[in-house]
Amino acid sequence: MIQFFYSLWLKNIAILDIIIIAAGFVLRVYAGAFVINAHLSVWFLLCVISVALFLASGKRRAELNVIQNVDGLTRKSLGSYHKDLLNSYVTMFGNASWMSWSLFTFFESPRTSTPFWLVLAELSNTTAIGKLLMLTIPVTIFGIMRYESLIFQGKSETPERLLLTDKALVIAVALWVILVYWILYSGISVIQ
Protein backbone atom coordinates (compact mmCIF):
# COMPACT_ATOMS: atom_id res chain seq x y z
CA MET A 1 0.00 0.00 0.00
CA ILE A 2 2.78 2.41 0.94
CA GLN A 3 4.61 1.46 -2.27
CA PHE A 4 1.49 2.27 -4.30
CA PHE A 5 1.12 5.76 -2.79
CA TYR A 6 4.87 6.31 -3.03
CA SER A 7 4.80 5.54 -6.75
CA LEU A 8 1.69 7.66 -7.22
CA TRP A 9 2.75 10.91 -5.54
CA LEU A 10 4.74 10.58 -2.29
CA LYS A 11 8.01 10.25 -4.23
CA ASN A 12 7.49 13.85 -5.38
CA ILE A 13 7.46 15.29 -1.85
CA ALA A 14 10.91 16.16 -0.52
CA ILE A 15 11.89 14.68 2.85
CA LEU A 16 8.81 12.46 2.84
CA ASP A 17 10.30 10.48 -0.06
CA ILE A 18 13.36 9.64 2.06
CA ILE A 19 11.19 8.69 5.04
CA ILE A 20 8.99 6.43 2.89
CA ILE A 21 12.02 4.65 1.40
CA ALA A 22 13.36 4.07 4.92
CA ALA A 23 9.94 2.90 6.13
CA GLY A 24 10.04 0.19 3.48
CA PHE A 25 13.23 -1.23 4.99
CA VAL A 26 11.81 -1.06 8.51
CA LEU A 27 8.60 -2.82 7.46
CA ARG A 28 10.68 -5.63 5.93
CA VAL A 29 12.51 -6.09 9.24
CA TYR A 30 9.20 -6.14 11.15
CA ALA A 31 7.78 -8.64 8.66
CA GLY A 32 10.82 -10.88 9.09
CA ALA A 33 10.57 -10.67 12.87
CA PHE A 34 6.86 -11.50 12.70
CA VAL A 35 7.49 -14.54 10.49
CA ILE A 36 10.10 -15.97 12.85
CA ASN A 37 8.24 -14.83 15.99
CA ALA A 38 11.17 -12.74 17.22
CA HIS A 39 11.28 -9.82 19.60
CA LEU A 40 13.17 -6.85 18.17
CA SER A 41 14.87 -4.58 20.68
CA VAL A 42 14.30 -0.85 20.52
CA TRP A 43 18.01 -0.23 19.93
CA PHE A 44 18.07 -2.68 17.03
CA LEU A 45 15.04 -0.99 15.48
CA LEU A 46 16.63 2.44 15.92
CA CYS A 47 19.70 1.09 14.19
CA VAL A 48 17.63 -0.26 11.28
CA ILE A 49 15.77 3.06 10.97
CA SER A 50 19.03 5.04 11.06
CA VAL A 51 20.73 2.85 8.45
CA ALA A 52 17.64 3.01 6.21
CA LEU A 53 17.54 6.82 6.44
CA PHE A 54 21.31 6.93 5.83
CA LEU A 55 21.02 4.82 2.66
CA ALA A 56 17.99 6.75 1.37
CA SER A 57 19.66 10.14 2.01
CA GLY A 58 22.82 8.93 0.30
CA LYS A 59 20.81 7.79 -2.69
CA ARG A 60 19.13 11.20 -3.01
CA ARG A 61 22.52 12.92 -2.59
CA ALA A 62 23.97 10.88 -5.48
CA GLU A 63 20.90 11.55 -7.64
CA LEU A 64 21.29 15.28 -6.99
CA ASN A 65 24.90 15.03 -8.19
CA VAL A 66 23.76 13.30 -11.38
CA ILE A 67 21.08 15.87 -12.24
CA GLN A 68 23.56 18.73 -11.86
CA ASN A 69 25.28 17.32 -14.94
CA VAL A 70 22.03 16.70 -16.86
CA ASP A 71 19.30 19.11 -17.91
CA GLY A 72 15.97 18.50 -16.17
CA LEU A 73 15.03 16.71 -12.99
CA THR A 74 14.64 12.98 -12.78
CA ARG A 75 12.19 13.41 -9.88
CA LYS A 76 10.29 16.43 -8.62
CA SER A 77 11.47 16.05 -5.03
CA LEU A 78 15.10 16.57 -6.07
CA GLY A 79 14.27 20.16 -6.96
CA SER A 80 13.51 20.82 -3.29
CA TYR A 81 16.80 19.47 -2.00
CA HIS A 82 20.01 21.40 -1.61
CA LYS A 83 23.34 19.62 -1.57
CA ASP A 84 24.16 20.99 1.90
CA LEU A 85 20.85 19.75 3.30
CA LEU A 86 21.43 16.24 1.96
CA ASN A 87 25.02 16.36 3.27
CA SER A 88 23.57 17.14 6.70
CA TYR A 89 21.11 14.25 6.45
CA VAL A 90 23.84 11.83 5.39
CA THR A 91 26.09 12.92 8.26
CA MET A 92 23.26 12.90 10.82
CA PHE A 93 21.95 9.45 9.85
CA GLY A 94 25.44 8.02 9.45
CA ASN A 95 26.23 9.09 13.02
CA ALA A 96 22.89 7.81 14.26
CA SER A 97 23.58 4.45 12.60
CA TRP A 98 26.85 3.66 14.31
CA MET A 99 25.73 5.19 17.61
CA SER A 100 22.49 3.18 17.72
CA TRP A 101 24.43 0.01 16.83
CA SER A 102 26.89 0.80 19.63
CA LEU A 103 24.08 1.35 22.12
CA PHE A 104 22.44 -1.85 20.93
CA THR A 105 25.63 -3.75 21.78
CA PHE A 106 25.85 -2.09 25.22
CA PHE A 107 22.31 -2.69 26.46
CA GLU A 108 20.39 -5.88 27.08
CA SER A 109 17.05 -6.64 25.53
CA PRO A 110 14.50 -9.19 26.75
CA ARG A 111 15.01 -12.88 26.04
CA THR A 112 13.15 -14.25 23.05
CA SER A 113 11.41 -17.56 22.60
CA THR A 114 12.83 -18.13 19.13
CA PRO A 115 15.16 -20.99 18.17
CA PHE A 116 18.87 -20.40 18.60
CA TRP A 117 19.69 -20.78 14.91
CA LEU A 118 17.80 -17.65 13.87
CA VAL A 119 20.39 -14.92 13.44
CA LEU A 120 17.92 -12.02 13.48
CA ALA A 121 16.45 -13.19 16.74
CA GLU A 122 19.89 -13.73 18.22
CA LEU A 123 20.93 -10.21 17.22
CA SER A 124 17.99 -8.92 19.21
CA ASN A 125 18.75 -11.25 22.12
CA THR A 126 21.75 -9.51 23.66
CA THR A 127 22.87 -10.71 27.04
CA ALA A 128 26.49 -11.62 27.69
CA ILE A 129 27.12 -11.95 23.97
CA GLY A 130 26.01 -8.35 23.60
CA LYS A 131 29.17 -7.27 25.34
CA LEU A 132 31.22 -9.18 22.78
CA LEU A 133 29.21 -7.56 20.00
CA MET A 134 31.03 -4.37 20.97
CA LEU A 135 33.92 -5.83 18.97
CA THR A 136 31.91 -5.02 15.85
CA ILE A 137 31.74 -1.28 16.60
CA PRO A 138 35.05 -0.34 14.90
CA VAL A 139 34.08 -2.34 11.80
CA THR A 140 30.66 -0.66 11.81
CA ILE A 141 32.23 2.79 12.05
CA PHE A 142 34.67 1.99 9.24
CA GLY A 143 31.86 0.69 7.01
CA ILE A 144 29.75 3.80 7.57
CA MET A 145 32.73 6.10 7.03
CA ARG A 146 33.63 4.29 3.80
CA TYR A 147 30.07 4.39 2.51
CA GLU A 148 29.78 8.06 3.45
CA SER A 149 32.96 8.85 1.51
CA LEU A 150 31.45 7.08 -1.51
CA ILE A 151 28.27 9.14 -1.08
CA PHE A 152 30.28 12.36 -1.19
CA GLN A 153 32.06 11.09 -4.30
CA GLY A 154 28.61 10.74 -5.88
CA LYS A 155 28.75 6.94 -6.14
CA SER A 156 25.81 5.94 -3.95
CA GLU A 157 22.96 6.03 -6.43
CA THR A 158 22.72 2.23 -6.28
CA PRO A 159 23.67 1.12 -2.74
CA GLU A 160 23.34 -2.58 -3.54
CA ARG A 161 25.94 -2.27 -6.31
CA LEU A 162 28.35 -0.50 -3.97
CA LEU A 163 27.95 -3.22 -1.36
CA LEU A 164 29.01 -5.77 -3.95
CA THR A 165 31.73 -3.88 -5.86
CA ASP A 166 33.63 -1.59 -3.49
CA LYS A 167 36.45 -3.74 -2.10
CA ALA A 168 36.81 -1.89 1.21
CA LEU A 169 33.06 -2.02 1.80
CA VAL A 170 32.85 -5.70 0.84
CA ILE A 171 35.67 -6.51 3.28
CA ALA A 172 34.04 -4.45 6.06
CA VAL A 173 30.65 -6.13 5.56
CA ALA A 174 32.23 -9.60 5.37
CA LEU A 175 34.28 -8.96 8.52
CA TRP A 176 31.20 -7.66 10.34
CA VAL A 177 29.14 -10.73 9.34
CA ILE A 178 31.97 -13.09 10.36
CA LEU A 179 32.39 -11.35 13.72
CA VAL A 180 28.65 -11.37 14.46
CA TYR A 181 28.32 -15.01 13.46
CA TRP A 182 31.39 -15.98 15.51
CA ILE A 183 30.17 -14.07 18.57
CA LEU A 184 26.65 -15.51 18.37
CA TYR A 185 27.56 -19.11 17.62
CA SER A 186 31.02 -19.77 19.05
CA GLY A 187 29.70 -20.41 22.55
CA ILE A 188 31.97 -17.75 24.05
CA SER A 189 30.46 -15.76 26.88
CA VAL A 190 31.63 -13.05 29.21
CA ILE A 191 30.69 -12.24 32.77
CA GLN A 192 28.67 -9.06 33.03
Image (spheres, rainbow, N blue to C red):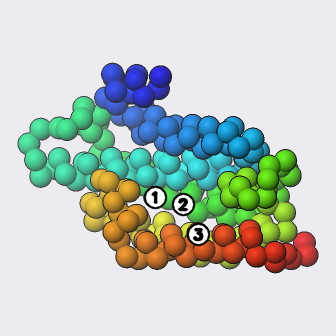
Residue 22 image label: none
Residue 55 drawn above or below residue 4: below
The answer to whether 177 appears left or right of 188 in the picture is: left
The answer to whether 93 appears left or right of 184 in the picture is: left
Q: Which residue corresponds to mark 3?
A: 177
Mark 3, mark 2: which one is toward the viewer? 3
For numbered disc 3, what is the local secondary structure?
helix
**CA gap, disc 3 to disc 2?**
20 Å
The outermost residue toward the left is 71
**CA gap, disc 1 to disc 3?**
24 Å
Residue type marked 2: Asn
Residue type marked 3: Val
Q: Which residue corresponds to mark 1?
A: 91
Residue type marked 1: Thr
2 and 1 marks in contact (CB < 8 Å): yes
Residue 20 drawn above or below residue 185: above
x and y percentages locating residue 129 in the rendered image: 80, 69
Instruction: Tell me the quarter of the picture where residue 131 sits.
Output: bottom right
Residue 95 image label: 2
Instruction: Tell me the quarter of the picture where residue 162 sits.
Output: bottom left
x and y percentages locating residue 107 in the rendered image: 79, 60
| Residue at figure coordinates x 71%, y 43% from the top left | 36
The front one of 51 and 119 is: 119
The answer to whether 189 appears left or right of 6 in the picture is: right
| Residue at figure coordinates x 91%, y 75% from the top left | 191
x and y percentages locating residue 189 in the rendered image: 85, 75
Task: Give the class, few, some or many, for how many residues have Cα within 10 Å of label 3's Cα (few <14, many ≥20).
Answer: few
Marked residue nearer the N-terminal end (3 or 2): 2
For numbered disc 1, what is the local secondary structure?
helix
Residue 8 drawn above or below residue 35: above
**CA gap, disc 2 to disc 1?**
6 Å
